[in-house]
């Protein structure tokens, strides 16, 4: 079995219909378990108080905001190279979810930053690149809406996705590129010593898993809607020609 079979809209609709209930259930279980564990059963941090618990929303949403753009880049490249419509529609479906994740990350980051840094916003390298990433999400969505021909829209948004990937990369590695700025390094790392304490680390991993499953559920649902809309437009075009 080839992975390219799922580029067929019929095959995608069948497989996603089977997977959606499982993904939705697992997303609900892991999100509720992770958030309840993190917010109600972890202690206050010595230097941060209860503010530390914002990581259970901020870290997963920030990770998803960046990785959703990477997913959009991959599916856009598949469209540009192989012309698989489901790939283009999946990228289109993921963009609003990525924008919401970016906004959540910026908002929760401001909540964290105000008591920690004494300011709601700072033109820190990572914060600035993250804001620009959010603007690219807005531009991507607007470009899809502005062009009537779906194939042309997919081509142009694919190119925009390539350009925006620079800022997705900067958002992820800005702290490593510049040895300045207020934003701390990664909360999760291959180096165990750089991770947050285990008491926060395990519920955080559960929350991250929940956010990933939530994204998969949302992007499958939205892609299915986009496929149906594409079919509806095709039927309407045939009726006009008949």
Image: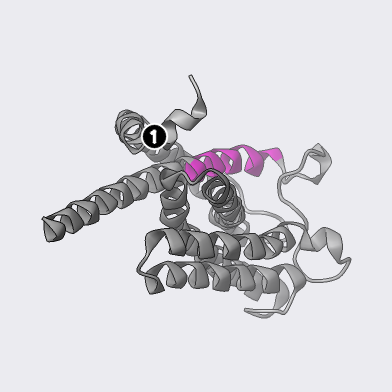
Q: Is residue 225 magenta?
A: no
Would residue 211 be found to the left or right of residue 43 on screen?
left
Residue 140 drawn above or below residue 84 = below
| x and y, in percent, of residue 192 in the image | 79, 38
**Residue in the foreground of this view, choosing between 104 and 67:** 67
Way the structure is coloured = one colour
**Residue in the foreground of this view, choosing between 37 and 31:** 31
Count the numbered circles shown. 1
Q: Residue at x 65, y 71 (%)?
A: 113
Q: Residue at x 54, y 38 (%)?
A: 206
| Residue 204 visible in the current orientation | yes
Farthest top residue in view: 1
| x and y, in percent, of residue 239 in the image | 12, 56
| x and y, in percent, of residue 129 in the image | 69, 70
**Residue in the foreground of this view, choosing between 52 and 61:** 61
| x and y, in percent, of residue 225 in the image | 29, 50
Q: Quick one: quadrant of the C terminus?
A: bottom left
Residue 79 drawn above or below residue 28 = below
Q: Which residues are magenta?
A: 198-212
| Residue 37 visible in the current orientation | no
Element under disc 1? helix
Q: Residue at x 67, y 80 (%)?
A: 119
Would residue 161 be found to the left or right of residue 2 on screen?
right
Farthest front residue in view: 242
Q: Is residue 203 magenta?
A: yes
| Magenta stretch, main secondary structure class | helix
Return the residue at label 1.
Answer: 23
């Amino acid at each position: 079995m080839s992975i390219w079979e799922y580029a067929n809209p019929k095959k995608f609709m069948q497989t996603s219909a089977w997977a959606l209930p499982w993904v939705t259930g697992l997303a609900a279980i892991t999100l509720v378990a992770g958030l309840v564990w993190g917010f109600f059963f972890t202690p206050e941090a010595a230097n941060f108080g209860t503010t530390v618990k914002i990581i259970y929303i901020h870290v997963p949403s920030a990770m998803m905001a960046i990785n959703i753009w990477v997913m959009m880049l991959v599916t856009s490249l598949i469209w540009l190279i192989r012309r698989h419509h489901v790939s283009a529609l999946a990228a289109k479906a993921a963009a609003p979810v990525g924008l919401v994740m970016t906004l959540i990350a910026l908002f929760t980051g401001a909540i964290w930053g105000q008591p920690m840094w004494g300011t709601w916003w700072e033109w820190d390298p990572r914060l600035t690149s993250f804001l620009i990433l959010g603007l690219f999400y807005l531009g991507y969505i607007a470009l899809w809406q502005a062009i009537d021909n779906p194939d042309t829209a997919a081509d142009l948004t694919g190119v925009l996705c390539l350009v925006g990937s620079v800022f997705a990369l900067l958002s992820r590695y800005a702290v490593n590129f510049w040895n300045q700025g207020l934003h701390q390094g990664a909360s999760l790392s291959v180096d165990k010593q750089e991770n947050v304490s285990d008491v926060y680390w395990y519920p955080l991993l559960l929350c991250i898993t929940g956010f990933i499953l939530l994204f998969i559920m949302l992007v499958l649902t939205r892609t299915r809607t986009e496929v149906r809309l594409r079919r509806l437009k095709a039927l309407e075009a045939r009726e006009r020609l008949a």
